[in-house]
Image (cartoon, helix red, strand yellow):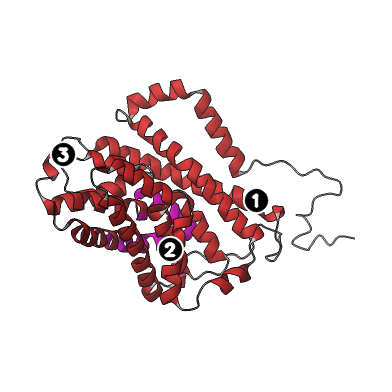
Amino acid sequence: MTDLRHPRAHALPPTGARRRYQPGSLEIFGLILLTAILLRTQLAGWLGHVLPTGWATVFVAICVQATPFLVLGVLVSGAIAAFVPASFFTRVMPRNAALAVPLAGVCGIALPGCECGSVPIAHRLINRGVRPSAALAFLLSAPAINPIVLVATAVAFQAEPRMVWARLVAGLLTAVLVGWIWERLGRPEWMKPRLRTPVSGVPADEMGVKVFLPTVRGDFTQAAGFLVIGAAAAATLNTVVPRQFMAHVGSSVFLSIITMGFLAFFLALCSESDAFVAASFSTIPVVGKLVFLTVGPAVDIKLFAMQSGTFGRRFAVRFAPVTFVVAVVVGVGTGLLFFGGWR
């Protein structure tokens, strides 16, 4: 006989009762996306009245550019969680942070994606036992030095082929320096507690499709939500900044460097396409363009939102300023080294 005084007695469902269906975050996200597609004409007209001209176009462009690489990132993240044992990373990665960080940075060249996909992968690497400084170095280097980004940069800067090598060096150096800084100054309590069990009710050592599909779904819905927030913020700033402003920036090297750094943060362009935007700034010195290409893949408003959701706000408010300063300094130094001046 059930003891009615027991606190869980009333919570037990009757035998044979059918569990009530509750839509999850993925179903809700899909419903919103489907509604937006079916009512895109009405939404575009309504948004045109309440938002700046071109806002919807920029917002959709950012989301469309980022979503394929976000999907690639969560698929890789899910595969790491489901099919790669945690012991693999402890065997492969050096125990010494001085070696682990640059090795992780160099490994970023193997991921053909943008910064959106690197966030869930870095989170999964940390969850599988990789030291945070090395995972963060991978997070920063992957969108900056992968082959797709370098080829796009070569096409955009055909008149300045040294920009490809300058971007490679600046991106890798930024990732390694930030990783070493975080190893020295970072604190575990600044990041969200990491759960070894990726799926509720599944043992941490269980692997396979049972872990892969729920992990991909969870990572995507979490990252996609913050991608939308970041894209909305970037679209707002993109349409608010007057285009005539750029004509006056190029007259000052210092002003162009600072402006290009902040533009890279707020515009939140995909790293596969930002080279074409940078090349279009004809009045900006080449060093300023390199700063733009170094800061953008490392830290922008979209990444800040995604990192806040993945690693926690306490992490993001510390990591983003450090990354921004290092990227600007490295971009300037690398530009002077490769181009021999402020031109």
Judge from the rendering whether residue 16 lies leftward or rightward of residue 246; answer left or right: right
Q: Nearer the viewer, mark 2 or mark 3?
A: 2
Q: Amino acid at mark 3?
A: Phe
Q: Is residue 323 magenta?
A: yes
Say above or below: 45 vs 126. above
Mark positioned earlier in the residue sequence (3 or 1): 1
Q: Is residue 293 magenta?
A: no
Marks 3 & 1, CB-CB < 8 Å contact: no
Q: Which residue is mark 3?
A: 245
Which label belongs to residue 106?
A: 2
Instruction: Using the image as rendered, state which of residue 177 and residue 14 is in the foreground.
Output: 177
Q: Secondary structure at mark 2?
A: helix
Q: CA distance from mark 2 to mark 3?
A: 37 Å
Crowd tier of the residue under label 2, counting other residues whose Cα lies within 10 Å: few below 14, some 14–19, many 20 or above: some
Coordinates of residue 171 in the picture (x, y in percent):
34, 58
Which label belongs to residue 214?
A: 1
Which residue shows up at 61% across the image and 39% down it? 27
Q: Secondary structure at mark 3?
A: helix
Instruction: Using the image as rendered, state which of residue 76 and residue 237 is in the foreground.
Output: 76
Q: Secondary structure at mark 1?
A: helix
Crowd tier of the residue under label 3, counting other residues whose Cα lies within 10 Å: few below 14, some 14–19, many 20 or above: few
> What range is drawn magenta here?
298-325
Q: CA distance from mark 2 to mark 1?
A: 30 Å
